[in-house]
Image (cartoon, rainbow, N blue to C red):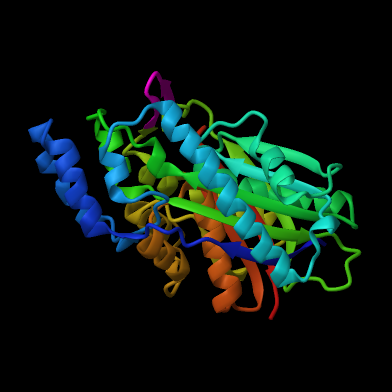
Amino acid sequence: MPSIASISKIDLPCKTPQGDVKEQARIAFTSRSPHMERLMDVFDNTQIVTRNFCKPLGYYIGHSTFEDRNNAYLETSLKFSVEAIENCLSKANIHKDQVTDILFVSTTGLATPSMDALIINAMRLNPHINRLPIFGLGCAGGVSGMAKANAIATANPDAVVLLVAVELCSLTVLRDDYSTSNFIGSSLFSDGVAACLILGDNHQTPGRVKYKAASSKLYYDSLEVMGWDFTNNGFKVLFSKDIPEFINENVQGDIEGFLSQHSLKLSDIRNFIFHPGGKKVLEAYTDALEVKGDFLKNSRIVMNNYGNMSSVTVLYVLERFMNHGFEDGYGLMMAMGPGFSSEMVLLEMKN
C-alpha cells in the first residue's frame, strides 16, 4: 500500500483576527448597503478566531479587477507552493529529482499553463514528471487529490507523488457584491497552501500512514448547492443554507456503505480527518454520526485558527494529526463539495 511520507502547511503572512475582519466587512458592506448591518453577527457565530490571508486587510477593501486578483493568485500560489514542497521534501529526506508525479488542486484561480508547470519551471524539477492539474472540486478537492495521488502510487510502486493544494479564497470575495452568499463567504473563507508526499510500496522508508481505499459520490439534482458563478468581475460564490441538512440526511449511510465494502464499521474509525466547512457543518457531522467523544477536535481547531480554506483545509487537519498525534488504527478523510459531492479516503495509521 502507498504511504504518506510527509506533509507541510503554510501559515500565510497576513494571519488576521476575526474581529478585525468583521470591522473591515462592516466598512466595506454596510457603508454602501446599510441593511447588511443585521448580518454582522454572522462573524461572531463562526467560532473562527483567526483567518489565514495572503494579503493585508486593506487590499480587499480597495478596487481591483479580476485580472489584478488572478495575477495575485498566480504570484502567491507559486511562491508558497514552492515553500511547502521544499519543506515536505526535506521532512521526508527526498530529493526533488526523485519526484515522479505532481498533482495540483485548486478552485480559486486560473492558470494556463497550469500551476504545476510553473512549479516545475521554478524548482527545476524533472521535466518528465507526470502532471495532473485538478480544478473545480471546491472543498472536496483535498480528499479527491489524496485519492488520486494514492491511485498513481498504487499503479507504480516506485512512484514519488507530490500533492499540492492551494486556495486563495480571499481573492474571490467581490467588493461590490451585496448578496448573502458573498457576505457569508467574507465571514468564513480563508487562504491556505499545503503539500503532501506519497510514496509507492517499493520505497525503503514507508510512512506511518498508509492508504487503504477511496470513495467518490456525486448526488443527482444538487448542482445548485455549492459552486461558482463566473462573472465579469470574477468568481461569485454560491452555497445553500441546506448544506448541513444535506449532510444530516446522507453522511451516515454513505460512510457506513463505504466502510462495509472493507469489512469495517464506523466504530472501527479512530481518527476523523474531516473538512470543517463551518460551525454548522461540524454540528451536522456530530449529530449524524453520534460518535462518542470529541472526535472532530482537530477539524475544529484548524477551523478556529485558519477559517475555511476550501480544499486545503482537510490537509491542514491531516497535518495536525500527523504532527500532534493520532490513535493507532483506521483514519477516515472526508469532505463535501460542489456537485453536490462527497469524497472519502480510508487510511491505516500506526505510530
The image quadrant where one finds the N terminus is bottom right
Quadrant of the rendered structure where residue 282 is? Answer: bottom left
Q: Is residue 288 visible?
A: yes
The image quadrant where one finds the C terminus is bottom right
Q: Position of residue 231 (x, y in %)?
A: 40, 20
Quadrant of the rendered structure where residue 92 is? Answer: bottom right
Nearer the observer, 193 or 331: 193
Segment colored magenta: 228-237
- Asked if the stretch drawn in magenta spans residue 109, the answer is no
User: Which residue is depicted at the point 69% across and 50% down?
Assistant: 147
Placement of 63 over or under 212, stated as above or below: above
Q: Is residue 336 visible?
A: no
Placement of 335 over or under 203, stated as above or below: above
**Left or right for 177, reference 138:** left
Q: Position of residue 170 (x, y in %)?
A: 38, 43
User: Which residue is depicted at the point 66% across and 74% down?
Assistant: 329
Placement of 110 over or under 255, stated as above or below: above
Nearer the observer, 28 or 202: 28
